[in-house]
């Protein structure tokens, strides 16, 4: 049985959606699954654009054979060697020994690492920056985009129809559920958060490399963006929308003048302070305020929110003379992903010898272009009346920085 879709004349979707996977890379929660995208161009020569994860091997192979309809497979282009896109390479070559594999020099190094028993010497085509692959009426142009987000990553552009095959760039979590195109979705409200979470936690560290890739990609007359995860962008409005988001994310520019308050709490007192601060901000007219208990929300969502807003409030108890573990994880994760250009407001709680505040400051020293509001708060177990005024002052300073 097959589950294929015709995307355009001579272009077909042969990927699938995995709704059973609990965590992406065994780390990031997937509440609604993830799609693995693969495409076939049917021209004088046939060309498969990447494979998919082993979890959907049967679906993928059925789709591929249905679309080929008895034709041989001339080329397999490997844009990205990460296993969720490349682990069916051997399965394809077993069924189509005639296929030439197209990749760059680093691609074939990675293929050897993953499949040391595979001998491709008589069937590999090594491409470099600017090389082309002629399929007949369609011609692919290759551009190398290393560290978006692996060193071997490349993208390709089909000049006749304006198709951009962008590997993991412009990817999104969530299964497709039949909605193959972004314009079939309420993307801005339902899927944007998962596109951002994907970027922030997978690609986020490599903003400079994304910008370098854009210098090659964006001057091209792109009419369709075909990523390896998530929906396809085929309208001018959708392409402009997601490119604008990537421009912001990759330059660490906040999407919005908003505030997230991320707190840790053992017995509720730091949570109370967070709620009061949120109320004070609201009374000052701040509209985009989100409050998160770091122990209840997976860090990947918090990192995504940190990429979204301009201001981050961190309130942490001192825990065994250290930063509260859930807060420590949050800070570690957004630092790991290279977050820049944010304004922080800091506070701590501690029944004796509170140390979290200084430890947080020390940790944030690793960040780039961070600024701080001047008012801090140090709670001794629970808030006192004077500290209500401190929270109001904190809110006022945050409002002034928006």
Image: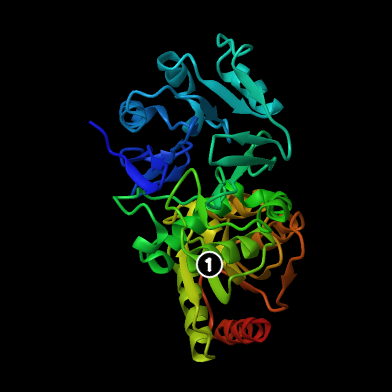
Residue 291 falls left or right of residue 309: left
Observer-nearest of 114 and 139: 139
Residue sitting at x 62%, y 34%: 133
Residue at figure coordinates x 54%, y 53% from the top left: 170
Q: In this view, does 355 lie above or below 22?
A: below
- Expressed as whole percent of the image width and height from the top left, the position of residue 266 reads 46, 59
Measured as percent of width and height from the top left, residue 134 is found at 60, 35
From the top left corner, tell me how far across and down residue 144 is, in percent: 70, 40
State the scheme by which the image is colored. rainbow
The quarter of the rendered structure image containing the N terminus is: top left
Point 44% across, 17% down: residue: 96
Can residue 349 be spotted in the picture? no
Q: In this view, does 197 lie above or below 310?
A: above
Question: Is the residue 5 above or below the residue 402 in the image?
Answer: above
The image quarter containing residue 106 is top right
Numbered circles on residues, count: 1
Residue 88: x %, y % from top left: 44, 24
Q: Quadrant of residue 188?
A: bottom left
Can you name the residue that lies furthest to the bottom here? 284
Q: Which residue lies furthest to the left in this view?
A: 1
Q: Image height check: is 263 above or below 257?
A: above
- Badge 1 crowding class, 10 Å Cα cut-off, few under 14, some 14 to 19, many 20 or more, is few
For numbered disc 1, what is the local secondary structure? helix
Residue 189 or 75: which is nearer the viewer?
A: 75
Q: Is residue 23 left or right of residue 166?
A: left
- The residue to which callout 1 is attached is 241
Q: Nearer the viewer, residue 44 or 280?
A: 44
């Amino acid at each position: 049985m097959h589950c294929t879709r015709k995307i355009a004349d001579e272009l077909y979707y042969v990927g699938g959606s995995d709704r059973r996977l609990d965590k992406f890379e065994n780390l990031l929660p997937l509440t609604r699954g993830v799609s693995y995208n693969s495409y076939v161009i049917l021209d004088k020569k046939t060309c498969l654009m990447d494979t998919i994860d082993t979890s959907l091997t049967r679906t993928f192979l059925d789709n591929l054979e249905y679309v080929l309809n008895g034709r041989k497979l001339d080329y397999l282009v490997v844009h990205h060697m990460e296993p969720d896109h490349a682990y069916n390479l051997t399965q394809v070559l077993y069924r189509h020994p005639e296929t030439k594999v197209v990749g760059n020099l680093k691609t074939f190094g990675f293929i050897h690492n993953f499949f040391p028993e595979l001998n491709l010497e008589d069937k590999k085509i090594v491409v470099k920056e600017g090389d082309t692959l002629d399929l007949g009426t369609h011609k692919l142009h290759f551009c190398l985009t290393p560290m978006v987000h692996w060193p071997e990553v490349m993208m390709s552009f089909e000049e006749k129809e304006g198709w951009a095959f962008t590997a993991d760039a412009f990817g999104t979590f969530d299964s497709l559920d039949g909605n193959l195109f972004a314009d079939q979705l309420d993307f801005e409200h339902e899927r944007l958060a998962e596109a951002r979470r994907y970027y922030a936690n997978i690609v986020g560290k490599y903003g400079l490399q994304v910008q370098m890739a854009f210098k090659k990609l964006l001057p091209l007359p792109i009419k369709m963006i075909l990523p390896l995860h998530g929906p396809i962008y085929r309208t001018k409005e959708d392409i402009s929308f997601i490119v604008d988001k990537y421009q912001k994310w990759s330059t660490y520019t906040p999407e919005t003048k908003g505030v997230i308050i991320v707190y840790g709490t053992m017995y509720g007192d730091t949570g109370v302070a967070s709620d009061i601060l949120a109320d004070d901000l609201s009374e000052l007219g701040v509209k985009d305020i989100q409050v998160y208990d770091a122990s209840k929300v997976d860090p990947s969502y918090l990192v995504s929110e940190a990429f979204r807003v301009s201001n981050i409030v961190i309130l942490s108890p001192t825990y065994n003379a250290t930063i509260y573990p859930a807060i420590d994880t949050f800070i570690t994760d957004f630092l790991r992903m290279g977050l820049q250009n944010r304004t922080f407001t800091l506070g701590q709680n501690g029944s004796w010898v509170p140390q979290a505040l200084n430890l947080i400051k020390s940790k944030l020293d690793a960040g780039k272009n961070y600024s701080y509001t001047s008012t801090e708060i140090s709670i001794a177990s629970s808030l006192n009346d004077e500290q209500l005024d401190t929270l109001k002052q904190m809110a006022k300073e945050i409002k002034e920085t928006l």
